Image (tube, grey):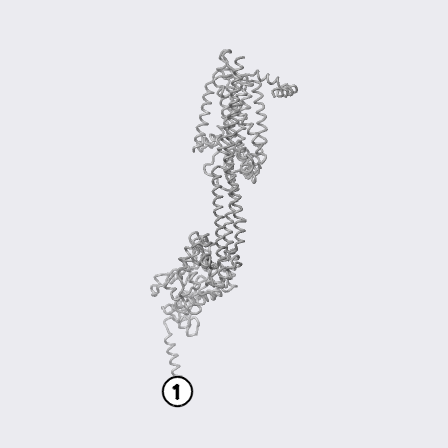
Amino acid sequence: MKKYIITLILIFLTGYLTNLSAQTKDECFNCHSAIGGEQASQFSNDVHFKAGLSCSDCHGGNSKSDDMEAAMNKTAGFKGVPKGNDISETCAKCHASADKMKSFGANIPTDQFELLKTSVHGKLSTNGKDRIIQCINCHGAHGIVKVTDRRSPVYPLNVPKTCAKCHSNAVFMRNYNPKLPIDQYEKYRTSVHGILNAKGDPKPAQCASCHGSHGILETTNLNSSVYAVNIPETCSNCHSNKEYMKKYNIPTNQYENYSQSVHGIALLQKKDTGAPACNSCHGNHAATPPGISSISKVCGTCHALNAELFASSPHKDAFDKANYPECETCHSNHLIITATDKLLGVSKDAVCSKCHTPEKNSEGYKVAKNMKSLIDSLESSEKYAKELIDEAEQKGMEVEDEKFKLRDANQAILEAKTAVHAFNEKKFDDVVVGKGLKVTEAVKNDAKAAIDDYYFRRKGLGVALLVTILLAIGLYLFIKRLEKRQNNS
Amino acid sequence: MKNSIQNIYKWIDDRLQIKVLVEYMGKKYVPVHRHSIWYYFGGVSLFFFIIQVITGILLLFYYKGSSDLAFESVKFIMSKVQFGWLIRSIHGWAANLFILSIFIHMFSVYFEKAYRYPRELTWLSGVLMFFMALGFGFSGYLLPWNELSFFATRVGSDIFGVVPIIGEPLREFIRGGSDVTGATLSRLFGFHVALFPGIFTVLLGIHLILIQRQGISEPLHYNKEEKKERKKMPFFPNFMLRDLLLWLIVLNLLAILAVYFPAELGHKADPFSSAPAGIKPEWYFLFMFQSLKYLPAHILFVDGEVVGILLFGIAGLLWLLVPFWDRKSSRGEHNKLINYLGIFAVMFIIILTILGWTS
């Protein structure tokens, strides 16, 4: 019994002392705590509460008065629960002021509100008055903790879920952008980034790492960090950082290689947004390296014919068995250079010779050698045809049709470069000889005929001049004789 | 051989009495003096016209007068038709030489005062043919439907629009609409191959009949010489054979130009593209084009270009009517003013053409 009484006294004392310690000079907080208000309870853990801010700093009113009438009087500036844009503007009163933030000892940026206003989230919401997103939608209202605090909804591990609250909500998203997918969160969880994130690693990329936080722009905006041309640099922020990537044990030269590749030059230098960026091959939200057997499918999203021909070629099975990464085996991955004819054949530079030699895989060696010889013939024949056309044109002959026809030869060269992926000599021959060389021969004959015609014209002129001059001389002599005869008579 | 030819001649003469015609022509004489050389330019102009008619008909076999097909058909003529390039090149060069030859012929007639009584109608028909030759040049220039011809026609037809009162309707009539389009091509094609040749042939017929009827004009100084001292040659066969000799030489010149400087094809006209820089009309319009460029924007509250067009109009009218206001020459007196005006006109045309060409 005695023990029971002592325990009761201790519980009472603990409760009293705890209550006593929670007592502050903020009468709003005191009163709302006393009535068991949830917001007051959350606010006791809030970073703002700890910095000495009062409820009235956001809600207005007189926090020093314990008289409810006086404290929540509108003449004392009480505004109750801020609504719509008023929410973010209330936060911005301090967060957009460097001086105020300094006075709280906080060393964080003060441009969040400005960024929010220009961001995609800063556009007008369906009510036509307020912005789509206010600060509290991501950061919460009364229990705001530091971004580095694991409990924060904007802590890296929690960001995907916070964004998904809206972005995975089809009903909500269709109000603003019905065509925008809502499976980003699901995909993200299957990505390398998402898996590590779920395991509690805050370093791998989450939504804000690529899209930014307060100033998120639409992907079609040239200034967006995920605009096609900017994607490689965005990825390289982490992937080219040796220190940052150290623990993952993967290369950090992808950006360097990519920027020298045919794709990188097209995208980064020529600003061709049709050229692939990192996400084109690796995916964006579900970013992961493609599996060995699916590389040709990934490349085939653009290089469709090449991929189709490769899939039906003898190399498909051979590569799969040898665990060779399909396209990458010959073309490399990030450092894909322009595919020239040098890749084909059995010379030192040719990729075929890596596996095919006169001794080893000799059938392929012969095919590669023949294919190279055929494409070389077509290219030199096309070049010679072009020279003949130029010569004829310089001589003033009309060769527009031949120039037009020669485009078919050029097309055949391009087709041959695709047909090579079937690794089938017959199919290759059909393109090079059946299409290309047939055209170049016809063009050469026409151009030669035009050049011959040029010389024929000059010879013809010579003959015509000779005839007319002889006629003129004959006529002149006839006139002279006639006039002499007339004078004599 | 000689007998067979004589038999054929006799066969024809029995039916057509050619001998009468030959005798008539044999009685006609051409004065021989230090300016006789200019007499030949009438014949040379006629020769070029005959060439134009023949080559024009040959081109018509393949040419298609629509904006969709005109350029392609000319390309076909140049590259696929046997000697098509030669026919087109001769047509192009002969057109230029035709106008040059008419210029020379017209000015030589002017300086010789050959327009004076009783040859006023010969002069009128000749000057009208000269205007028609310019019309041939303007209408034919658009027919290849290439970039240069398209924009030059647009600039050229714009100038018509400047003429007061009738300018706008005239431009609409020439263009067949508000801008140069396929309708303009069809219209100018019609003028070039049907309307103009028809009128020109009638004028040419009148011109030649008048020359045969009135004979070759004798210069004023020739008439003052003693009758015995006046040299002359029979029109047939002497003058005609000399004419024929010159035609052969001119034909050679034409062949050399056509082979060494064939007509260009250019790029197909694109009405939506911007006009190429420095677009100019053909050389025979250049002096007028350049003169208009030098005129100030306004002359006494009137648009400078309007003043220019009106001045050229008045000058053209005075030129056409010169036999009617130069009464002195008709009386057989020397008229120095006519010479000065002629020299001024020649110098003006040459200088402005050079300036236009080099600008």
Judge left or right: residue B335 versus residue B17.
Answer: left
Q: Residue furthest front?
A: A359
The residue under the point 40% across, 86% down is: A4
The quarter of the image holding the N terminus of chain B is top right
Q: Residue A347 in the image: x percent, y percent?
A: 44, 54
Look at the image and tell me whether residue B91 can be seen: yes
Q: Chain of mark 1?
A: A
Secondary structure type for disc 1: helix
Q: Residue furthest right?
A: B15
Q: Number of callouts in the render? A: 1
Q: Residue B95 in the image: x percent, y percent?
A: 52, 30
Q: Residues within 10 Å of mark 1 (few under 14, many from 20)?
A: few
Q: Quadrant of residue A116?
A: bottom left
Q: Quadrant of residue A147?
A: bottom left
Q: Residue B292 in the image: x percent, y percent?
A: 46, 31
Q: Nearer the viewer, residue A43 or A222?
A: A222
Q: Nearer the viewer, residue B211 or A104?
A: B211
Q: Residue furthest bottom?
A: A1
Kind of residue sitting beneath label 1:
Lys
The quarter of the image holding the C terminus of chain B is top left
The residue under the point 60% across, 18% down is: B21
Q: Residue A310 in the image: x percent, y percent?
A: 51, 58
Circle 1 is placed at which residue position? A3
Q: Nearer the viewer, residue A17 or B316?
A: B316
Q: Is residue A132 above or below residue B310?
A: below
